[in-house]
Structures are given as C-alpha cells and as structure tokens.
Amino acid sequence: MSPLLRRAQAAPDHRPGTGPRRLLPRRPRTGRTPLPTIVVLLALAGACALSLPLLGLGSRVSWGQLPHLLASDSARSALLLSLRTCLASTAACVVLGVPLALVLARQWPGVRLARVLAVLPMTMPPVVAGIALLSTLGRRGLLGARLEAWGVGVAFSTTAVVIAQVFVSLPYLVVTLEAALRTRDTRPETVARTLGAGPWRVLLSITLPLVAPALARGTALALGRSLGEFGATLAFAGSREGVTRTMPLAIYLARESDTPTALALAVLLIAVSFAVVGATTLRWDRLLAAACPGAGARATRTWPPPGAERPDPCDAPISTSTATSDATRSTPDSNGTCPAATRSTTVGPGPGSGVSTSRGEDLEVVFSSPERDVVVNLLAPAGRVTALLGPNGSGKSTVCAVAAGLLDATAGRVSLGGRILDGPEDFVAAGRREVALLGQAPTLFPHMCVLDNVAFGPRCRGLPRGEARSLARSELAAVGAAHLADRPCGTLSGGQAARVALARALAIRPRVLILDEPTASLDVSARQELRHLVSRRAREEGLTVLLVTHDVVDVAALADTVVVLEQGRVVETGETDHVLSCPGSDFTARLTGTAVLTGTLAGSPQAPAVELSAGPATHPATVPDSEPTSRTGAVHAAATAEWTAEQRSEQGSGQWPGHGPRTIVHGRPEEAIEGFQPGLPGTALVPPDAVALYRNAPQGSPRNVLAGTVRSLERVGALVEVQVEVAAGQRLRATVTAGAVTDLGIEADQELWAVVKAVEVRIVPRRAPAAELPQVPRTVGTQPSRPSRPSPSSDREQT
Ligand SMILES: Nc1ncnc2c1ncn2[C@@H]1O[C@H](COP(=O)(O)OP(=O)(O)OP(=O)(O)O)[C@@H](O)[C@H]1O
C-alpha cells in the first residue's frame, strides 16, 4: 500500500471533500486529460502576447472623437476602397482556391512540390511579393509589356490592389481547405457514386458541404489577410487616394502627420477583421434554424428541437412480422402521437407493399486482380441470397467493389441478367448498374436530414424533388423508420442509421443488393433487427443479394447459397444447409465450430484418413484407468484422432500413448473425394457433436480414440468449450455443460481421452498454401483502363 493511502486510512476521517483530511489524490471530474501546469502558463503568456498590443493601441485612441475622425473624406474613401477590393479579391480566392485545393489534395507525381509552391507567397516578405508582381504585370514586366501594347495597364490601378491581395491571401484559403480535403472521410462520396451521383453532384452536394467549415475558415483568413495587406499593394499599386490607397496604406501615411486619425482607422480595421473572422466561428446552422424553423431539419444538429419532447413515441423496436405493419408507421404528429395512416407515396407496387416484384437477376462476377492476388468466378443467382464468406483479406470487399463498379474487373466480366456491366468493351459506372452497395458503416450524409439522405439516389436518377421525397418516405416506412424522416443524421443510433442506410440503398430500386458486413458494428438486438429487415425487404423485392459476413447466424438466417473465398480464390460453394452441416473448407469448418485437424492423407476415398502432424508426447507415463469413469458424460467435442494399435498396446503395457508420431484420424467413407491422393496434405473436419470426452481410456474398440491435453476452457453462453490439444498445435473442441466440467473434473493441462465417430468426420484434401497457388498471369490486368474506370488499386483511397 502506498504511504499516501496508509496516511489517508489512518486519518480519523478521510471522507472525500473534508478539507485538509482529504489526502487521497483528487480524481479528475471530467473525462478530459488535465493539461500540465507549464502548458497552461505558456498558453497564458501567448494570450498576453496577442492581446497586450491591442490593449496598448486602445489606450492611445481618442474614443470620444472616433466618429468625427472616421467621417473624414480620406478615411471614408480608404474604408470603401478596402471593402471593395477585399470582397473582390476574396471572391477571386474562392473561385481559384477551391479548385486548386481539390487538385492539391489528390495524389499525383509532383504534388508535394506543388503544395510547397502554393504556400510560398505566405512566407514571402510582402514587399518582395509586390516586386514579383511588378516584374510580371508592371509596364516592363513579363506579361505587363504585352498588356500595355493592347492598351491594358494593370500596375498602379485598383485592379493591381486586388491582384496583390489575391497573391498574398490565396494561400491561406488553399492551405486550410487542402488540409481538410486531404483528411476528409471519402466514404460518403463513394456512397454517393453508388447511388448514381455524377462528379458535379458529388462535388457540390457531398464534398464541399462536408468541408464547409474549413472553406469558411479559409475564406475568412483570406479576407482578413486582404484587409491587412500593405507591402505588396504599396510596391505594385502605389498609394493613390481613392484608387489604390486602402486602409493600411492610409494608416501608414497618417501615422506621423495625423496620429489620431491613424489610430481611429486602425481601430476600425481591427473591428472589421474581428467581425469577419468571428463570423466564421458562429454556428450559422443553428442561427438559421432559430430564425426560420422550417429550415431546421436541414440545418440543426440537435434533436429534439427546443420545445419538443423526448422520447419519440414511435421510436420502438420495429415489428418485422409483416410489411404492412412497418409500412403504416409514420411521422408523429405535432402532439407526438403516431397517426395510423401513413403519408407514404408508393411507386409501382411500392416498398413494403408485400407484393413481390422479383427484380433480381443473375449476377455473374468473373475477374482477376493481380495487384490483390484475387481470382474469382462466382454467380449470385437471381432472387436469392448468396453469402460470401472468407477470412480477412481473402478478397470479399474486392468482389463487392468490382460488382458495384467501384473497381475495374480487369480481364474479366461482370454481368447482370446477361447484360454486360464490365467487360473488355463495356463499362457501366457505379450508380448506373442497378446495384446497391451497403457497407460496414451506414455512412449517412451528415449534412442532410434522413429524408434527404434517402431521396438522394432518386434525385440523382432525375426524379423531381417532390417525387423523390415521396419515394424516400415510403422507403423509410418500409424499414420502420418513417418517424425519423426529419431527423438530422447525427442524432440517430447505430441501429436507426443502419435502417436508414438500407432504405437509401433500396430507394434506387436496385436489382442487386450488396451487403458488405452491414451488421458488423451493431449490437446483438440491432443486428437481429437488421437481419430480419434485410431478409424481408429482399424477399418482397425479389432482389439478388450478395451478403458478406463473418457471422454464422447471418449465414444460417439469410443465405440460400454460400461462396467461400480463401486467399483470393473460391474454395467452396453450395447450398447453405449443406455447407453448414458438411463444411468443405477450413474457414466454414471454423465458422461452424468444427475442428480442423491437418496432416497427410492416408487410405482411400472409401476408407479415408489423415495422419496428423507429429507432436511431442505430453502425458505422463502413467497407466490410465481403463474403466470409463462413472462420470463418463459423453460430452461433445469438435475433433479427434485415432488411438492407434501401437498406442493401445502401449496402454496395455502401462504406457500413456501421448501424442504419438502416428496419430491417425479416420473419416467417413465416400465414393470419391476430389483430389484425394495418399501422401498429399489433408484435413480432417470434425463437427462439434462427434466427440465424447473421457477422463480415463475408453473401453471397447472405437476407431478414433485420441489422447490429449486440456488447453483451454471457455464459457460460450450456458455451455463450456473445452479445447484439447491432440497433436502439436492441433486442438479438438468440445462443447460441454458446466455440470459435465465439474463431473469430469476438467481443468487446464489435464490429460483426457476423446472418442470421435468416424462417420461424422470429413476428410478433404488440403488446399495448397498461397505461395503454391497458380500465379495470375502478369499480362492479365495490365490492360490500360478506360478513363472512366476506377483504378484497380484506388478504391480504398476513395472509399
Ligand atoms: N487498395 C488496395 N490496394 C492494394 N491492395 C489492396 C487494397 N485493398 C485491399 N487490398 C488487398 O487485397 C486483398 C483482398 O482484400 P479485401 O479487402 O478484398 O479482403 P476482405 O476479404 O474483404 O477482407 P476483410 O474481411 O478484412 O474486409 C488483400 O490482400 C488486401 O491486402
């Protein structure tokens, strides 16, 4: 115990908050990490450095005479000229700076140098900037001489003032905006593309609104810099009253001859700068919402709006029983009650109408991506749900991106109902394929309300605003989210956001719905809810669904067929029931809890076996009790191996067989096993209910008996998973009741016996490791992409 704690406990009263007796360190009251004192002191010194000169200036100003001093002709002329030129130069900065920042935020050869050049005018002494401008646009300058020949004189004019201001202030806007663009989340833009937005709509509706705060700040900085511009203006434009003499110049000239006027102008300049920069820090959205409540849904980020009550009476878990029940949900009325009738407008049979439209068509995806070492050929049948499974990095997202048009199917083909979406000659862009993509995160557009999010896709497809909103309302109703329509997206829970994202994907009336782990970030109940919803909506619309998931419950509940990818190749396909009950790959075996034991194939397809990799004997050389104990609860496990004849005789001789060098697992006889060849690598897949654990060596002559060591015990719901190592690094899994664990006295490092029914063990040839896989020919995929195609390796950057 620390001395401090001892003292605290020894004190007669060490209740918190009792003055000097409070010896325990004070806990921080907020979650914020406290700043070191020295940092706070330095910050105060910095604040003084910024504010003291202003105080000094204020102390010299004749405040009483201020209106009189500022009313002089020269002061008014300087002020008006400053405002005119600053507004013009700021507008020019926005027009030129936004495109420049967009280009500089991308990756291209030489972009780093370009970024340095863009910042350079910020670091130049202003007078040097003026000389540079004079050398370019002056009468004898690089361009100025030609302009003079055409009768256009730039230097020493009001235009020169604007040019000088643009030159020094443009970098402020570019740097601020470019940093925001480079670090922005690009997923909303990718989603917008998949919903059918073209480049202009993505830029104007998504990209710029998302970086609007940085644009506002950059613009304010540019305006502030223009207002204060002096050196470059003086060198390039001179000081002609009413023409080029802006406020800074007027202050400079008056500072000796007419100090009170100079100080008054200085105060005015500071006040204007303060107003301009301060305006960018205001929450305009809130002010607008307060000023015109009708605009609140689009602008405000708070919910409920002031005066409204929580909780939302319609915000209950949705019923997934019938489409109609969801479709009748609607926006609560002003009293907060949910009217029975929906305001939804349906298009055609309409979402949630319960009428199957069977829009789905066969989706075929055949491609190779040498960069990612993915070679895939798969078919998602029309109107069915195909689960795409595989370990991390196996290529699932790549398949989704290719199918959605975010990635070019190099040397391949994507077709929908026989129509080529991506092939050697054709490429249909993302968003024009009738393919909707729903990713792990809902990625709602944060600057739009829920209704506008869902109406975005239909708007991109040319639907008038009113119709798009009606369709959006009915889509929201169909997923039980009609009452969220006017909510800002930032106020939704994860489950609500997922529902809205589903409605948004379905609002474009796709034929194919691609779900790339949409339930990954949800809790159990929200996950279940979304699962039901996807299943119901896919059925109602008759959609072809490609579902990426790592959750076996998703597969069992939703999928009709399963495709398994490993190391970028399809290793297993089949009907869901078959794949789950008879997994044919390591991945599905693990997914279903089946133990995977590896070794060398032996026997024949009619009597298949796998000889496990050799492992050290770990059991002590004691004679096991040959009586199965009375506590022989035949507990079910997930793998086994044969106790060989030699091992039996070892046991008879009083030797514990341990993990002998010839641990063999026998499997179910088959008529034929593709690729079976004794001596090649093989796998024994042992389902969870095929194994019984014994504390002592079992009697009788079971074919597969395995000696092993308990390596872990883990609670799985009401049961306990026992992992038993049967060869070096190879474990069986047994799922037993907690009672059986107690009865058998199972604990870590204990030796056990496992018996596995051979008829339940599948023996399959093992797939060669990645290094031995046939390489994709390098010529494939090196074809130049058509300009409109996304680059094969650029989707991550974009997504
Ligand atoms: N932008 C990229 N550029 C190059 N290679 C990439 C890129 N994105 C992914 N890869 C590679 O492509 C392969 C397949 O990745 P992909 O993301 O498709 O796998 P996944 O099965 O979806 O994985 P996860 O389950 O982790 O999402 C991996 O080897 C990965 O490293």
Image (spheres, rainbow, N blue to C red):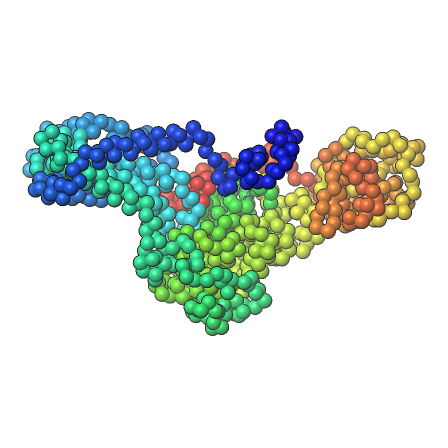
Is residue 170 shown above or below 380? above
Residue name at image x 58 percent, y 54 percent: 527
- Name the image quarter holding the C terminus: top left
Where residue 130 appears, as percent x and y from the top left, is 17, 29
Residue name at image x 28 percent, y 32 percent: 52
Is residue 472 shown above or below 45? below
Where residue 591 appears, as percent x and y from the top left, is 66, 47
Left of 717 or right of it: where is 30? Answer: left
Left of 480 or right of it: where is 650? Answer: right
Q: Nearer the viewer, residue 353 or 260?
A: 260
Given the current orientation, which residue lies at the most extreme front position?
12
Q: Nearer the viewer, residue 628 or 775?
A: 628
Is residue 775 visible in the rendered structure shown here? no
Report how many numbered discs are placed on residues in the image.
Answer: 0
Given the current orientation, which residue lies at the most extreme bottom position?
341
Residue name at image x 72 percent, y 43 percent: 714
Q: Quadrant of residue 230?
A: top left
Residue name at image x 37 percent, y 40 percent: 180
Is residue 59 shown above or below 95? above
Where residue 725 appears, as percent x and y from the top left, is 76, 37
- Name the image quarter holding the N terminus: top right
Where residue 774 appears, as percent x and y from the top left, is 58, 37
Is residue 783 shown above or below 201? above
Is residue 305 visible in the rendered structure shown here? yes
